[in-house]
Amino acid sequence: MRVLLLLIVLSLTTAKLSLAQDSLKFKNESTAGFLFGINRLGPSFQHYTGVVLEKYHIEAGIVLGFDQYEYFNINPVGIALKTPLFKGKKIDTILGFNTGLGFYLFQTKGPEDKYQPQLFTHPNLSFRFGKLRKVNFTVNAGYKMQKAKTIVIGGQNNGSWWPIAPSKTVSEYKLQRLVVSTGISF
């Protein structure tokens, strides 16, 4: 999986260097914020790299991140679409939608624990302001829906002479959180 991420980043970097600056514009956005749940608060970091299609009034790209839930450290990897709702002189309002898979790259795992990548969706609304040398400050608010699935294989002998067959426990979770973040866009 790490090799796939490296290939995606390298291909976007190569595409940026090989194309003329006039024909294609790129947009990068890095944000840090919090996931708000029921009596829970977790950090959320996200980086978006995309291409601006001004003719169609849309941005499309990839999104990478890190979200910490109660029992999971999930790394969302997916695609993002953004379109401006209102373009102002000082503030742009942007509607976005991210979707992809959540991986467990930084999850502490036991020897018999398995974590399967699961789908996430994240509709959001962004405000970009303060255009300073093509650098914007951004504030995002959205609702993230992340599924999680764990498989634990285990069994206990409990000190008896009779062996106990290993058991398989599959748990599925639906994690829904409000996401508020701020960052820079360039």
Image: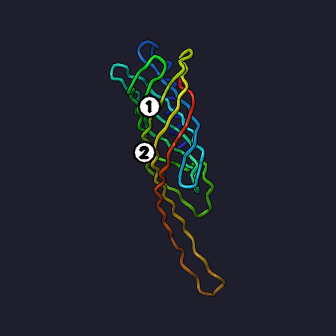
143 shown above or below 168: above
Q: Secondary structure at mark 2?
A: strand
Residue tagged 1:
61
Mark 2 lies on residue: 121
Q: Residue at x 59, y 48 (%)?
A: 42
How many numbered circles does the render carry?
Answer: 2
Which picture quadrant has residue 30? Answer: top right
Q: Residues within 10 Å of mark 2 (few under 14, many from 20)?
A: many
Contact? badges 2 and 1 (CB < 8 Å): no
Please indicate whether residue 172 sits to the left or right of residue 71 in the image.
Answer: left
Are there few (<14), some (14-19), or many (20+) residues within 10 Å of tag 1? some
* Residue placed furthest toward the left: 56
**Disc 1 marks which amino acid?**
Gly
Q: Which is nearer the eye, 164 or 103?
A: 103
- The amino acid type found where label 2 is placed reads Thr
In the figure, residue 60 lies in which quadrant? top left
Q: Residue 173, relative to residue 168: is it above or below? A: above
Task: Tell me which residue sits at (52%, 38%) in the image.
Answer: 64
Horizontally, residue 71 falls left or right of residue 48, namely: right
The CA distance from mark 2 to mark 1 is 15 Å
